[in-house]
Structures are given as structure tokens and as C-alpha cells.
Image (cartoon, grey):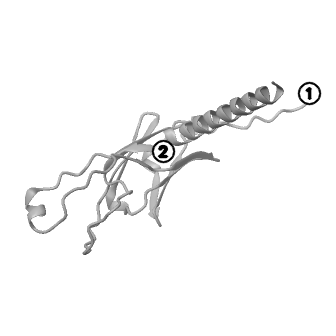
């Protein structure tokens, strides 16, 4: 009977561990999970020899970081395969909105088998900013598939050091 109780306890711990692992993964990935809207392709493009669209997921991951760095808020977003012309940034209230389009690159081959795991289409990601920023002074650059946006904080959001004097 002790062996059965031990086995039951071990299975319960394993089940709890798996559940906790999935919960943590879902929490970490929930912000990065991004919906892509497929790009409509014209019938004439298909007639010109392009392959027909394949059934693919409309969801993909665009991992990002947001942090405060002194007098600015920095947002980094992984945008593999995209260049600056594919991206549009807007600060609206306390949110940074990033819109973009990841274009499909057609590769031709003689085989009939294809697995497509990359997601293509237009997307929108929103980051809630932790402090008011000066949108007009924002700087952004896209290099090696990483978009980096630096948003200077408004003067009132920077805080001010107050010196404590004696007496």
C-alpha cells in the first residue's frame, strides 16, 4: 500500500510540475504572441506562376523587451526578415503601437513537399509605456532583425533627486 501511495504522490507532483511549466510558458509568451493578417494575393499573381497560398497559422511570436534606462524608455522587438520600410511606429497616449508587414519570400523548387513554420502578413503590437514620453524626440533603428526604439521620458516623469540637509 505504501508503494501505491508513493506512486500516486509522484504522479501528482509530476502533473503539478507540468501544469506550472505550461502556465509560466503561457504567461511569458502571451505578450509575444502576435496575430498576423494574411496578405491578399491577386489572382493574376497566381497565374504568373507563384505558388498558391498554403494553409499556415495566422499567429506567430515577436519577442520583445521593454525597460527603463535612466531618462528614457527602451523597447526592443525581434522582427526577423523585416527592414525599416516594413515598420510603422506611433505613440498614442501611454502606448507605443508598432505596425508592420512581414512579406513572404517565394522560393521555387522541384519537390512537392513543403513545411512552412514562418508567419507572414501584417501585424500590430502594443506596448504599455511605464511613464509619459516625448514622442517627438523618439529614435528608432532596425538592425539585424531587431527594432530598437528609444523614447525620452517627459521631464515630470523623470523624477527629481531631493537632497536631504541636516538641521
Q: Is residue 4 above or below residue 121?
A: above
**Residue ranking furthest to the bottom:** 110
Q: Residue at x 43, y 57 (%)?
A: 79
The quarter of the rendered structure image containing the C terminus is: top right
Percent across and percent down for residue 72 are 57, 47
- Of label 2 and label 1, which has the lower sequence position? 2
Mark 2 closeness class: few <14, some 14–19, many ≥20 residues within 10 Å: some
Mark 2 = which residue?
32
Residue 46 is left or right of residue 106, and the answer is left
Percent across and percent down for residue 6 are 79, 30
Q: Nearer the viewer, residue 76 or 162?
A: 76
Q: Is residue 73 above or below residue 116?
A: above
Q: Residue at x 22, y 56 (%)?
A: 53
Q: Is residue 66 visible?
A: yes
Mark 1 closeness class: few <14, some 14–19, many ≥20 residues within 10 Å: few
Q: Residue at x 63, y 37 (%)?
A: 18
Q: Is residue 164 above or below residue 119?
A: above
- Badge count: 2
Say whether marks 2 and 1 touch (CB < 8 Å): no
Q: Which mark is residue 167?
A: 1
Percent across and percent down for residue 44 are 7, 61
Amino acid at each position: 500500500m505504501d508503494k501505491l501511495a508513493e506512486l500516486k504522490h509522484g504522479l501528482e507532483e509530476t502533473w503539478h510540475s507540468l501544469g506550472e511549466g505550461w502556465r509560466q510558458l503561457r504567461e511569458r509568451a502571451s505578450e509575444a504572441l502576435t496575430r498576423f493578417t494574411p496578405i491578399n494575393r491577386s489572382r493574376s499573381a497566381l497565374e504568373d506562376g507563384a505558388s498558391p497560398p498554403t494553409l499556415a497559422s495566422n499567429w506567430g511570436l515577436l519577442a520583445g523587451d521593454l525597460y527603463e534606462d535612466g531618462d528614457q524608455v527602451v523597447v526592443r522587438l525581434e522582427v526577423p526578415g523585416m527592414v525599416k520600410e516594413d515598420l510603422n511606429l506611433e505613440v498614442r497616449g501611454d502606448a507605443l503601437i508598432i505596425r508592420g508587414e512581414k512579406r513572404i519570400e517565394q522560393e521555387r523548387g522541384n519537390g512537392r513537399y513543403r513545411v512552412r513554420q514562418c508567419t507572414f502578413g501584417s501585424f500590430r503590437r502594443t506596448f504599455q509605456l511605464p511613464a509619459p514620453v516625448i514622442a517627438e524626440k523618439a529614435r528608432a533603428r532596425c538592425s539585424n532583425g531587431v527594432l530598437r526604439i528609444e523614447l525620452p521620458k517627459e521631464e515630470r516623469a523623470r523624477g527629481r533627486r531631493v537632497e536631504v540637509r541636516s538641521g
